[in-house]
Amino acid sequence: MRKASAVAGMIVFLAGMNFPATLHAATLNFAADVTYALISPAASFTVLAGSGADSITVNATSVIVSVPAGQGFTLISASSGIDHAGATSGSIVNVTCDSNQVAILDIPSTNPSPQTLTITPTGAPCMAAAPPVPIAPQIPVMHGGGGALLSPAFKDLSFAVQPGTGAGPQNVVLVSNAPEAQAMLIGVSPDFAQASWMPYAATLAWTLPSSTARTVYIKFRNALGAISGLFHAPIPPPKDAKQAVNSSSTVLRTCTPYLTAYIRYGSTNDPVEVKKLQDFLREKEGESLKESGTYDQATFDAVKRFQKKEHASILDPWHETQPTGHVGKTTVQRINELACNPSGSPPVIPSQPSCPYFVGYAKKGDKGIHVADIQTFLAGQKLLSGIYAAGEFDKPTETAVKKFQAAHAKEILSPLRIASPTGYWLQATLRAANKLVGCK
């Protein structure tokens, strides 16, 4: 038997260990994803970050976990379906299978009674069409925070933060588009410390809990309990703010972003955004371009020249030496800076990525701006090229993630005792990517 007083980092239990092995603590708080490897049948279970338990016993064939009332706990398996036994009457234990055949066992933090479950692998991948198996009438899953899984059920989400109209710089307005959502979780840190779920509102006047906050984070939950990926947006200055930047009291102007979408050669792009890009390159950079609304070869080459000229703001944050021609995050930021400050005064929008840059998990089937950011990073790493759907975690993106995991196996795969890349953009992969863009 092995004992530990707390779970502070990554812990991996292997099939070759002496069984049973038990972790005990007042409460085991999982600050990172933890993987347990079983012998018979061969399978691995991963407890997601943000989960908690009183104890966990690992056997050759099962994992036994004790979860106190009011504590969330989520376990997944990409190698096998999940069975469980021991749930008490009135408890809430949800077992689902997502579209990628990842089995998910979730005890939400609303669970009213302590649970001691024996969790066993079925020995075969779960079926994607398998319905949830609740012990009690199913209610929306409320297990938020860094360990929440992304759900492919949400599509075409958007989120922005606008200056508030009330007195004080801590008043903002949150504007979101999430038609399927019934609830949302809002915070100023990606772990949603002290945040709680609230009814969904497309427009919400909100007071920042901290005057030093720089970013607002949000997740959405639908009627089936599926939780979206993590979205974030910078906090703008108040409408009446005057920002002195030097001794001469120069005031920075704020303006609506000129470009509002990413643009990629070979993808289906918004013609309006492409026309705005072409107009910018023609008027500001002296390029001879037609405002066709089509991201053609001439526009692509003009963007590469612009990226090379503005490499300090566009390429250097990615440790990239050659222009890509793809209008991604830092290219959009720099164009918006110049469009907003044509005189060359200090920009309102920082060109360096804020840390942590990558904050949301992702997997095949997910969509959103966070996926586009991942694709921009992978393209910069020379791992993603050719045809892929911008902003959609498609097959080429999954393949590129696997290549990235293989290239950084010592940091991503080895600590988990995983032999092959998974294609999931989870904590270890996210951490390695953040490190490469300068977020230690």
Image (cartoon, rainbow, N blue to C red):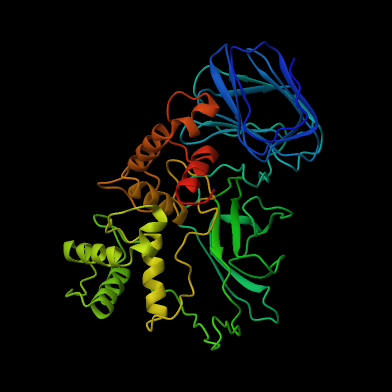
User: Is 319 placed left or right of 34 in the picture?
Assistant: left
Q: Residue furthest bottom?
A: 248
Taking the spot 75% from the left edge, 43% from the top edge, the residue there is 110
Q: Position of residue 284 (x, y in %)?
A: 28, 79
Q: Quadrant of the N terminus?
A: top right
Q: How many marks?
A: 0
**Most foreground residue, 146 or 122:** 146
Q: Tell me residue 93's x, y (percent).
A: 69, 33
Q: Does residue 115 lie above or below 397 as drawn?
A: above
Q: Quadrant of residue 134?
A: top right
Q: Nearer the viewer, residue 124 or 326?
A: 326
Percent across and percent down for residue 318 are 40, 53
The quadrant holding residue 301 is: bottom left
**Residue at the (60%, 83%) spot, across then down:** 241
In the image, residue 402 sits, relative to residue 313, either above or below, namely above
Please state the horizontal and vertical placement of residue 399, each as a whole percent of the image.
35, 37
Instruction: Name the residue nearer the viewer: 377 or 314.
Output: 314
The image quadrant that residue 341 belongs to is bottom left
| Residue 139 shows in this picture | yes
